[in-house]
Amino acid sequence: MRLTPAMRSFLEEKRFAILATTNSDGTSQQTVMWYLIDGGDLVFNTRRGRKKQRNLERDPRVSLCIAEGYRFVTVMGTAREIADPATGQADIRRLAARYSGEASADRQMERFSREERISYRVAIANVLSMGF
């Protein structure tokens, strides 16, 4: 299934994603994440050294579910790591502004700027949904 205009509109609204990665023992690891839509990609960002980053380094397959009640869109694909430090910082700034507003994003960047941030892009190709 492809992303429809209604699904894209749903994803562009401010919601949280549940990111699922695979642990080394094959079990799932889930994390509530900020995300944004950038062209045909879903973008998320993390600090280097977190469990999800280590999982993605080993196995870049992901599932991200964005839900509101029983309506949801799940995007599955391969996360492409963008390890460029400037991109990581720019993306976490865009995400902080999307979720917290400009003034709060500026304050949060005091902490984020001291971290090694990694962005990931997932091409939106395989989609499951309900309510659309």
Image (cartoon, rainbow, N blue to C red):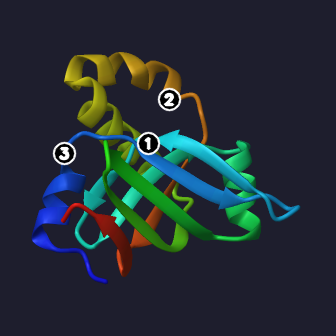
Question: Residue at left 38%, top 41%?
Answer: 16
- Distance in Å between CA atoms under marks 1 and 2: 7 Å
Q: Which residue is mark 2?
A: 112
| Residue for badge 3 | 13
Q: Quadrant of residue 28?
A: bottom right
Determine if residue 34 is in view: yes
Would residue 18 appear left or right of 31 to someone viewing this image? left
- Residue 14 versus residue 70: which sits nearer the camera? 70
Upstream in the sequence, badge 1 or badge 2?
1
Residue 82 % position (x, y): 51, 63
Amino acid on which disc 3 is placed:
Glu
Left or right: where does residue 115 sit relative to residue 43? right
Residue 3 lies in quadrant: bottom left
- Number of residues whose C-alpha sits closer than 10 Å to that of mark 2, classed few (under 14), some (14–19) or many (20 or more): some
Q: Position of residue 118 (x, y in %)?
A: 55, 51
Give, as a three-letter code, the residue at label 2: Phe
Q: Label 3 neighbourhood size at 10 Å, few (<14), some (14-19), many (20+)?
A: few
Q: Could you tell me which secondary element the residue under label 2 belongs to?
A: helix
Contact check, label 1 and label 2, Cβ < 8 Å: yes
Q: Amino acid at mark 1?
A: Gln
Residue in view at x 51 percent, y 39 percent: 32
What element does badge 1 sit on? helix
Q: Could you say which disc has been placed on residue 89 in the image?
A: 1
Q: Classify 73 as above or below 67.
A: below
Q: Residue furthest right?
A: 25
Q: Tell me if label 2 and label 3 are in contact, CB under 8 Å.
A: no
